[in-house]
Amino acid sequence: MKFNLSQILSTTMVLFAIIDILGAIPVVIELRRKAGHIESEKASLVATGLMILFLFLGESLLKVIGLDVESFAIAGSFVIFFIAMEMVLGLTIFKEEAPETVSIVPLAFPLIAGAGTMTTLLSLKTEYDTQNILVGILLNMLFVYFVLKNTNRLEKLFGKSGLNILRKAFGVILLAIAIKLFRNNTGL
């Protein structure tokens, strides 16, 4: 097992952009307001577990339902594209309801470990070594935990306009990732 710093940095940055926990701070604040409390530890652990599970079993699961990684990656590129469009244009395409406890649904899944993240993991697996992707997941989830624990402080630090700028910047990065995923898996 050989760790590659370049691969770790690449996977960490790609996952950071797709998870977009900084851009999700307004959503997390709203969920916390509606539910009264978010269990940061539980949300982080469940999301980490889902991502690691999908990293190892995702391809097999797809085979069981008759899909290949390329088809899933192309479908995921569309999901990532629409998430990015939401971020850049301020649209709401995906609608989610907030149940009494939001730590697992919709926070851990699908907000943190959603379809875009799962697709990205399978795509990363075709380009990078698994151990480097695991390190990228763990680094991101440590950051997610930190953000969830400090949402109110970060909201004050960045301010409304700072959060909007972050959201739009990561939206553009996600657009580029969606296009790259589409091109790599269609051969265009």
Image (cartoon, rainbow, N blue to C red):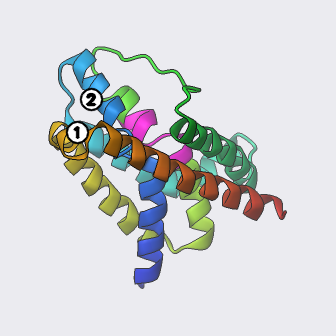
Q: Secondary structure at mark 1?
A: helix
Work out whether residue 2 or residue 161 is closer to the camera in this orientation and state it: 161
Q: Amino acid at mark 2?
A: Ile
Q: Is residue 109 visible?
A: yes
Q: Is residue 47 left or right of residue 81?
A: left
On residue 8, the disc is: none
Mark toward the start of the polypeptide (1 vs 2): 2
Badge nearest the viewer, 1 or 2: 1
Can you see residue 20?
A: no
Residue drawn at x 74%, y 46% is 67
Residue 118 horizontal/vertical position (percent): 53, 48
Task: Give the labeled residue for mark 2.
Answer: 29
Quarter of the image containing the N terminus?
bottom left
Rendering quarter of residue 173: bottom right
- Residue 183 figure quarter: bottom right
Q: Is 164 displayed left or right of 63 in the figure? A: left
Kind of residue at disc 1: Glu
Q: Which residue is mark 1?
A: 155
Between 57 and 28, the one nearer to me in the picture? 28
What residue span does the magenta drawing correspond to? 108-117
Picture coordinates of residue 52, whole percent (x, y): 42, 54
Look at the picture and state if 45 lies above or below 135.
Answer: above
Q: Are marks 1 and 2 in contact (CB under 8 Å)?
A: yes
Residue neighbourhood size for the residue with mark 2, other residues' Cα within 10 Å, grouped as few (<14), some (14–19), many (≥20):
some
In the picture shown, does residue 51 fall above or below 26? below
Does 168 sit above or below residue 43? Answer: below
Image coordinates for residue 85, horizontal then vertical, percent: 60, 39
Q: Quarter of the image containing the C terminus? A: bottom right
